[in-house]
Image (cartoon, helix red, strand yellow):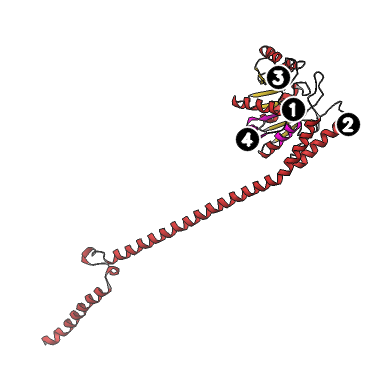
Amino acid sequence: MRVLVVLPTYNEAENVVAVLHKVRAALPDAGILVVDDGSPDGTADLAESAAAEVGHVEVLRRSEKSGLGSAYRTGFRWGLERGYDAFVEMDADFSHDPAALPALLAPLRRGDEVSIGSRYVPGGSIPNWSWHRHLLSRGGNWYASVVLGLRVADSTAGFRAYAASVLRRIDLDSVRAEGYGFQIEMTYRARRAGASVVEVPIRFVDRVAGESKMSGAIVVEALGLVTWWGLGRPFHATRRALGRVRHSLSRLRRFSLTDRARRRIGGRRRRVEGSADGRSARDARVAPAGAGGRRPVDAVPLGEARSDAAPAAGERAAAADAPAHGG
């Protein structure tokens, strides 16, 4: 399985070289794609310098900060064009432990299509978070799961892996959200595409170096999008139901046409067989004489049987009168 680790970066000069080495230690054969949004601190230059030592590292430079979701969509398209089989999302600030990468990818090797590094399944944890951050995160995940029917405990998690098969079924160009909203939207679209989603427990830690990119606007965006998608669920469910009805009617119509055709063919066959039986009967009545010059009894017409019988009766009468005449 060819794996591509996508690392979006913006001002990660303090972390990028170390995280590249850690990823390589965890996944010796994986490709690594750094998608840098024009970091003014030289993150892209440092990544390119480390690429020669780390190996299989590519750097995509973008001219401006375009958002987390946009960076991942760009990375996914880049990898799909080059035939990668699995794609990993992770932060470049060590909040996601590179040592957990093999466990994160294990479900994909078993045939699942989405593997989420979850903080909220047994074994997952978030040390050193305040109670209000826990409440906000858990509340947002619960709301998204209920409104969208995700059946996922941690739909906002940014440490996850996708199989190429499910990314091909998702229209990446129509994905709109960034930040938390992007992770929720991708989970929602993966579910709608029929993907099997597995959650793997992880330990999430806050960054040690660098500056957080999270903001209140990203949280508000996520909650607004979840509500909007939730309002659209009845419409999508109705459209799917109508699609199933149309499919059933189409199958019924094809069956009905086939049945009528079968009956027509059967009727023709019976008419042909009846015609053949009639011809056989007519042929039997005009059949030529058999051996010895005598025709079979059932082949002799009724009128001929009476004409043959008359001479035989006359001959018997003449034979009876002969002695009397002679005497």
The amino acid at mark 4 is: Arg
Instruction: Please say if 287 is above or below 227.
Output: below
Residue 181 magenta: yes
- Kindly identify which numbered label has been placed on residue 159: 1
Between marks 4 and 3 in the image, the one whose residue lies nearer the viewer: 3
Residue drawn at x 77%, y 41% as measured from the top left: 146
The amino acid at mark 2 is: Trp
Instruction: Kindly indicate the quadrant of the structure image that contains residue 169.
Output: top right
> Which percent across, then down, holds residue 25?
71, 17
Q: Residue furthest left?
A: 326
The amino acid at mark 1 is: Phe
Question: CA gap, disc 4 to disc 3?
Answer: 30 Å
Are circles 3 and 2 on residues that touch, CB within 8 Å? no
Find disc 3 in the rendering and name its residue: 38
Residue drawn at x 80%, y 28% as measured from the top left: 215
Res 224 visible: yes
Find disc 2 in the rendering and name its residue: 131
Find disc 4 in the rendering and name its residue: 169
Start and end of the magenta stretch?
A: 161-187
> Which percent across, then down, holds residue 235?
69, 46
The foreground one among 64 and 250 is 64
Question: CA gap, disc 4 to disc 1?
Answer: 21 Å
Q: Secondary structure at mark 2?
A: helix
Which quadrant, please, contains the N terminus? Answer: top right
Q: Earlier in the sequence, mark 1 or mark 3?
A: 3
Taking the image as shown, residue 105 lies to the left or right of residue 299, namely right
Label 1 neighbourhood size at 10 Å, few (<14), some (14-19), many (20+)? many
Residue 47 magenta: no
Label 4 neighbourhood size at 10 Å, few (<14), some (14-19), many (20+)? some
The foreground one among 61 and 320 is 61
Are circles 4 and 3 on residues that touch, CB within 8 Å? no
Instruction: Kindly indicate the quadrant of the structure image that contains residue 316.
Output: bottom left
